[in-house]
Image (cartoon, helix red, strand yellow):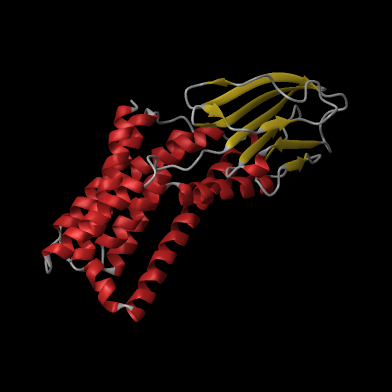
């Protein structure tokens, strides 16, 4: 048994070492176009950093605008940004905006529009759809759809948030306690997401990201220390830990949303849509994990038991894999302060 356990531990450490150093996927780009005069538009363009250089994408305004491509971007510490004013005779309604080079990338770009008459709108551009024809009157429905998809993508690409939820699924066996834990996590991060996005709560991003990694380390320790027939505090009252750490994860979500911003005319719809998208992505992940567990229970019951039985090789390996990955994130995020 000892050689087998050592093998599992070695595999866990190898998996952790191969994991990405960051718990977040590449942040989306952001193009903000605001009308400041009948034929003048202030443009803000933000594109992700890729290994210290700007991503090879460019915002291209309609051909009638001058200039229709901005100046070289500068690094603001997190991404590459540029700002300029374009003159567009006749306005930009009915004209096409393009993100050149996006078809070769793996990220999205959020386009946000604001007009002098108070109209506003948002649209999500993807590698499959890199152009957008600006409508005469952007709709709230379009804003909701864009921010919903951004929230859905963010949670599914945020490895640290998913690893936290996965650790909860590993630790909590009682279905009702699991429902309570997921609900508490949802309520908590919805609160801090709203407060931080609306400017009512401000916490520096780097400590938040480091503490999110620490929350995963905590759950990994709980997995490793659990005993058969005994329940640890996090198993008896999982909603307490879920709610407390959910507040932190909500600040992490808010950090991602603040990089994009909210449309002035549709803040409630955009905030609600992003939060609903996060929840939809989280529920999709939970459903996928539970479905895989059900298949494993039917096809390989011994394997599932090895993963759920305290101190079994599979359970130990999983605990160390989760803990090692989160510890790596914690160290790197603390070093980045």
How many tags in the picture? 0
Query: Residue at left 25%, top 49%?
Result: 323
26 lies above or below 3: above
Quarter that holds the C terminus: top left
Left or right of 159 on screen, residue 309: left
Please identify the quarter of the rendering in which residue 34 is found. Answer: top right
88 lies above or below 155: above
Frontmost residue, 162 versus 307:
307
Frontmost residue, 185 versus 74:
74
Question: Where does the image place residue 3, in percent across and percent down from the top left?
Answer: 14, 63
Question: Where does the image place residue 321, in percent across and percent down from the top left?
Answer: 27, 53
Q: Is residue 85 visible?
A: yes
Question: Where does the image place residue 264, in percent across and percent down from the top left?
Answer: 62, 32
Quarter that holds the N terminus: bottom left
Q: Residue furthest bottom?
A: 298
Left or right of 23 on screen, residue 129: right
Q: Residue furthest right?
A: 90
Query: Residue at left 65%, top 32%?
Result: 31
Left or right of 324 on screen, residue 265: right
Left or right of 101 on screen, residue 10: left
Question: Where does the image place residue 78, in percent across and percent down from the top left?
Answer: 48, 27
Query: Residue at left 82%, top 35%?
Result: 93
Q: Is residue 311 visible?
A: no
């Amino acid at each position: 048994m000892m050689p087998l356990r050592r093998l599992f531990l070695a595999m866990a450490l190898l998996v952790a070492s191969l994991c990405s150093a960051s718990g977040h996927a590449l942040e989306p780009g952001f193009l903000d176009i605001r009308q400041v005069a009948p034929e003048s538009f202030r443009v803000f363009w933000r594109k992700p950093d890729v290994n210290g250089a700007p991503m090879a994408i460019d915002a291209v305004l309609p051909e009638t605008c001058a200039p229709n491509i901005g100046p070289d971007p500068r690094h603001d510490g997190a991404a590459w940004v540029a700002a300029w004013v374009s003159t567009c005779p006749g306005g930009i309604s009915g004209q096409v905006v393009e993100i050149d080079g996006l078809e070769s990338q793996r990220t999205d770009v959020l386009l946000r529009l604001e007009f002098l008459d108070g109209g506003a709108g948002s649209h999500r551009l993807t590698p499959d759809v890199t152009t957008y024809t600006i409508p005469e009157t952007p709709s709230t429905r379009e804003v909701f759809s864009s921010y919903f998809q951004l929230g859905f993508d963010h949670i599914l690409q945020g490895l640290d948030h998913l690893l936290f939820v996965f650790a909860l699924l590993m630790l909590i066996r009682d279905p009702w306690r699991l429902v309570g834990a997921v609900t508490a996590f949802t309520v908590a991060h919805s609160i801090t997401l709203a407060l931080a996005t609306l400017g009512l709560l401000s916490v520096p991003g780097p400590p938040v990201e480091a503490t999110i990694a620490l929350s995963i380390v905590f759950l990994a320790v709980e997995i490793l220390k659990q005993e058969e027939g005994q329940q640890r505090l996090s198993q008896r009252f999982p909603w307490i830990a879920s709610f407390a750490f959910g507040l932190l994860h909500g600040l992490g979500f808010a950090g991602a949303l603040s990089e994009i911003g909210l449309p002035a005319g549709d803040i409630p719809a955009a905030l609600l849509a992003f939060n609903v998208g996060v929840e939809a992505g989280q529920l999709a992940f939970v459903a996928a994990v539970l479905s895989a567990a059900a298949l494993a229970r039917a096809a390989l019951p011994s394997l599932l038991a090895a993963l759920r039985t305290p101190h079994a090789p599979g359970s130990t390996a999983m605990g160390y894999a989760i803990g090692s990955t989160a510890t790596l994130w914690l160290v790197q995020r603390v070093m980045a302060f």
